[in-house]
Image: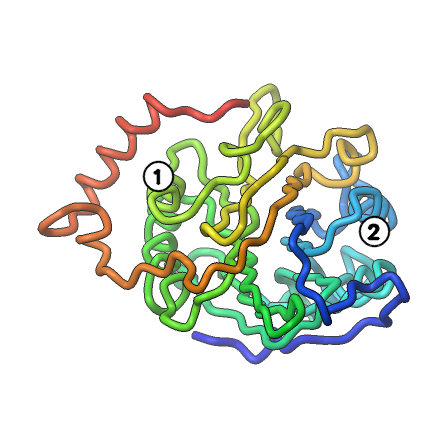
């Protein structure tokens, strides 16, 4: 279900905004679950989030767990405040209503936003609502880019259903996607990964191709997880990808940001693949049980660097 809540909004633009008369050939992408601006110390401080993002000088940003008008975050319109501080255009996708406010995802861009829409990917009405937000960007000279901001569920069954929704003609295999594509966000794909094995069949993991340093972005007690990812199609070539681990980032949220520098190639077609899920997975008949079993075996061999 598409939502009108993701209409692009305009923040004040600075003189440092990119000249869209000429398309940019290199971009810096950043994705960050900001935990509503509440840090590991339990203190709400949006300025820490702003400082972390600003220090990394991104061109495109996807944030998850963004509040608007909720008491726990001082009733702030967080997306608007962040966009104004960073001098970026932005769009906000509502995942659910909380109190008299909203909670969702936000995308920020140094380039003009042409269109934006949210799609409901909730797997079950009993579970927490989830959304993916698509944003179409003007990189200059009529060159466009598609940016997807995702925040997937906590349950294995939930993510299994969500990856099927994402890898469909309605979202990532939309026939109109013939431009550079980036999919960024909090995939929550642990302890049993069911999303990444399928995404890696069609898109490129920016950290796998150009990662430096440790990969983990979330810690639960002594256990560290890689929850936040950046995927790209063949039109974007990762040059360097890293996790921000400075002391401020360690405190500002319960997640760490992932950053990737990518080179844009502007090929004529992206990696859209309209094949049905059974053929994409190489199966005559799609079997969830078989898929989960094969995913477990595959991930024992692959494993992520922590």
Give whichever of 212, 166 is nearer the camera.
212
Q: From what the image shows, is residue 96 above or below residue 249?
A: below
Decide if residue 211 is on the left or right side of residue 157: right
Q: Residue at coordinates 61% horizontally, 33% vertically from top-left? A: 218
Label disc, if present, on residue 46 of the rendered structure: 2
Residue 292 percent coordinates (x, y): 25, 38
Decide if residue 239 is on the left or right side of residue 304: right
Q: Residue furthest right?
A: 15
Q: How is the image coloured?
A: rainbow
| Quadrant occupied by the N terminus | bottom left
Please tell me how crowded label 1 is: few (under 14), some (14-19), or many (20+) other residues with Cα within 10 Å: some
One can see residue 65 in this view: no
Label disc, if present, on residue 279 of the rendered structure: none
The picture quadrant where one finds residue 42 is top right
Quickly name the residue at label 1: 197
Q: Residue at coordinates 55% horizontally, 23% vertically from top-left? A: 306
Please tell me how crowded label 2 is: few (under 14), some (14-19), or many (20+) other residues with Cα within 10 Å: many
Residue 200 percent coordinates (x, y): 38, 42
Q: Residue furthest bottom?
A: 4
Q: From what the image shows, is residue 33 above or below residue 99?
A: above
Decide if residue 87 is on the left or right side of residue 243: right
Residue 32 percent coordinates (x, y): 66, 46
Residue 179 percent coordinates (x, y): 49, 64
Q: Residue at coordinates 56% horizontally, 50% vertically from top-left? A: 184
Report helix, strand or loop for mark 2: helix
């Amino acid at each position: 279900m598409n939502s009108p809540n993701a209409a692009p909004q305009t923040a004040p633009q600075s003189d440092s905004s990119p000249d869209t008369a000429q398309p940019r050939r290199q971009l810096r992408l950043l994705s960050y679950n900001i935990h509503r601006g509440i840090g590991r110390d339990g203190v709400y401080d949006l300025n820490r989030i702003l400082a972390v993002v600003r220090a990394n000088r991104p061109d495109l940003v996807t944030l998850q767990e963004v509040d608007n008008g909720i008491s726990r975050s001082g009733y702030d319109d967080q997306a608007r405040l962040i966009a104004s501080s960073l001098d970026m255009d932005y769009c906000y996708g509502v995942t659910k209503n909380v109190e008299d406010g909203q909670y969702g995802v936000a995308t920020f861009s140094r380039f003009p936003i042409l269109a934006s829409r949210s799609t409901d990917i909730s797997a079950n009405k009993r579970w927490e609502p989830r959304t993916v937000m698509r944003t179409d960007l003007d990189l200059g000279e009529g060159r466009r880019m598609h940016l997807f901001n995702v925040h997937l569920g906590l349950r294995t069954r939930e993510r299994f259903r969500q990856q099927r929704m994402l890898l469909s003609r309605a979202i990532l295999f939309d026939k109109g996607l013939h431009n550079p594509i980036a999919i960024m966000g909090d995939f929550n794909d642990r302890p049993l990964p069911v999303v990444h094995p399928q995404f890696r069949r069609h898109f490129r993991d920016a950290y796998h191709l150009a990662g430096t340093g440790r990969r983990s972005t979330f810690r639960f007690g002594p256990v560290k997880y890689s929850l936040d990812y950046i995927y790209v199609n063949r039109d974007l070539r990762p040059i360097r990808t890293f996790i921000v681990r400075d002391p401020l980032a360690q405190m500002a949220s319960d997640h760490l940001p992932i950053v990737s520098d990518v080179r844009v190639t502007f090929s004529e077609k992206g990696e859209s693949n309209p094949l049905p899920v059974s053929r994409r997975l190489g199966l005559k008949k799609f079997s969830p049980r078989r898929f989960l079993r094969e995913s477990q075996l595959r991930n024992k061999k692959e494993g992520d660097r922590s």
